Amino acid sequence: MTIYFRTVVYSWKNSVSSIFFGFFLAIFCFVNPVLASEPKPWQMDLQEPAGIIATKATDLHNFLLVVITLISVFVLGLLVYVCIKFREKPNVKPSKTSHNTLIEIIWTVVPVLILVVIAIPSFKLLYLTEADKPVDMVVKVSGAQWYWNYEYPDEEISFDSYIVAEEDLKDDQKRMLDVDNPLVVPEGTRIKFLITGNDVMHSFFVPSLALQVYSIAGRINEIWTEVPLGKKKYYGQCNQICGVNHAYMPIVIQTLPIGEYKEWLKEAKVKFAKVTHKDINKIALLKEKKVKEMK
Ligand SMILES: [Cu+2]
């Protein structure tokens, strides 16, 4: 009877909690459709990872958190133990012990082993981020004081991306995070970023994709990422202090379904047509001609 009663109570509790869970999940999904990866107010953890590198980086972070917590608790325990056991009252005559070979070997070997255990997944991840994987598209990113420039070498387009001023923000845009021209890419694509700079050092930082690469004038840094499927905005910011407007050069990577991306590309080719070498030569010839005519 008791077992039956417990089962009934248990299943009743379970179904009530499932209803509540479902209800809150529905509200959460309705109010907060996951269309953007951005920092949240009072956020304590990392942003939700997107793509293989970010997922592995988050796993490594969670693993390290366990290791760090265990070490901290152990050291704290030792300190408390020492403070209590070797306090003055029961130890009027203090011990003069200064060496213990076994303990000295342990406190040398154990940290080395811990470092090895940490190093293995860490190097694996580093290797993955540096691996020369075949990619679907290449984007050149240039940091400048104080905006980003994105160039699609295969499409011959290039455009600047500036922060949207507070007074110009639309309802769906975020203060300090949205830009006039986001970096648009098709969903589910593997992208190689070539990151360089025009002036001082900047840093291309998109936390949810685990991208953080210095942009340095005269040098090209490479990184790849795989944006997952789904129409979404990935927010980031320059995180290398680069001058007075350092805080005002956010990054937005907008993923679109392939059809919408192609539409965007069509418009972008008109709007952001890059001046090619041929055009530069043409302009130079025209200028020369004009100068001659003036003479
Ligand atoms: Cu910067």
Image (cartoon, helix red, strand yellow):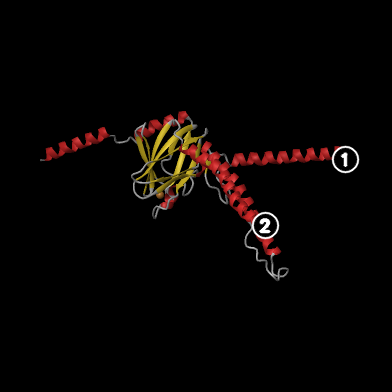
Residue at the spot 33% in from the left edge and 44% down from the top edge: 218
Which residue occupies the foreground of this view, 202 or 254? 202
Report x, y in % for residue 39. Answer: 53, 47
Which residue occupies the foreground of this view, 136 or 252? 136
Q: Residue furthest left?
A: 295
Q: Are marks 2 and 1 in contact (CB under 8 Å)?
A: no
Residue on which disc 1 sits: 2
Residue on which disc 2 sits: 77
Residue at the spot 73% in from the left edge and 68% down from the top edge: 90
Report x, y in % for residue 188. Answer: 50, 32
Residue at the spot 42% in from the left edge and 29% down from the top edge: 262
Q: Quadrant of residue 93?
A: bottom right
Which residue occupies the foreground of this view, 88 or 138? 88
In the rendered view, does 231 fall on the left or right side of 246? right
Asked which secondary structure carries label 2, the reply is: helix
Query: The N terminus is located in which quarter?
Result: top right
Residue flagged by tag 2: what amino acid is it?
Gly
For the residues labelled 2 and 1, the Cα–Cα distance comes to 43 Å
Residue flagged by tag 1: what amino acid is it?
Thr
Report x, y in % for residue 258. Answer: 46, 29
Q: Residue furthest top?
A: 259
Residue 51 visible in rendering: no
Dot 1, how many residues are within 10 Å of its Cα: few (below 14), some (14-19), or many (20+)?
Answer: few
Q: Quadrant of residue 261?
A: top left
Report x, y in % for residue 193. Answer: 42, 38
